[in-house]
Image (cartoon, rainbow, N blue to C red):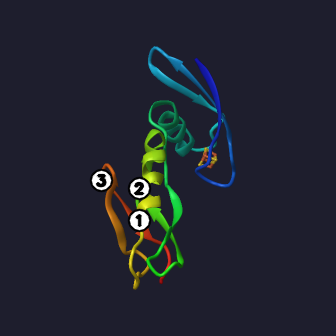
Amino acid sequence: MKRNFVCIECPRGCELTAETTQNGVNVTGNFCPRGERYTEAEMTCPRRIVTSTVRLTDGRMLSVKTDGEVKKEDIFVVMQKIKKLHPTPPVCIGNILEEHISENINLIATGNA
Ligand code: SF4
């Protein structure tokens, strides 16, 4: 199976082609080794940092993100959990708002309130 990707590891945005062979995944078009690692992860278990906002108990919105990459297949569940969160101020950048929101990944504040 052959698939095309655009590497999102840096602004260069290399156009990559990945082909599954008997020996694993053969990647071409990458300028550096990060593109190969990115493509292999995309082919096997794609992950993303999740960014969003939560509504505080006083009604203000606060930006949040996961402190690690969540499996793409789990992002919807994570977003459902985020939607139900209503932290009480004060909240500082880096505060953990929900431990283990997915696997060993936490949800943290990316702003102060
Ligand atoms: S392969 Fe390397 S140089 Fe190309 S976009 Fe990915 S990280 Fe950047």
Q: Is residue 46 above or below residue 60?
A: above
What separation in Å lies between label 1 and label 3 (alpha carbons)?
18 Å
The three-letter code of the residue at mark 1 reads Leu
Residue pointed to by mark 3: 104
Residue 41: % across, % down: 47, 37
Residue 85: give its label: 1
Residue pointed to by mark 2: 81
Residue 100: give its label: none
What separation in Å lies between label 2 and label 1 (alpha carbons)?
7 Å
Q: Residue at x 35, y 70 (%)?
A: 96
Disc 3 CB within 8 Å of nearest ligand 1 atom: no
Is 94 left or right of 8, judged from the image as shown?
left
Proximity of marks 2 and 1: CB atoms separated by less than 8 Å: yes
The three-letter code of the residue at mark 2 reads Lys
Q: Residue at x 47, y 47 (%)?
A: 75
Q: Quadrant of residue 32?
A: top right
The three-letter code of the residue at mark 3 reads Asn
Residue 20: % across, % down: 52, 20
Residue 51: % across, % down: 53, 60
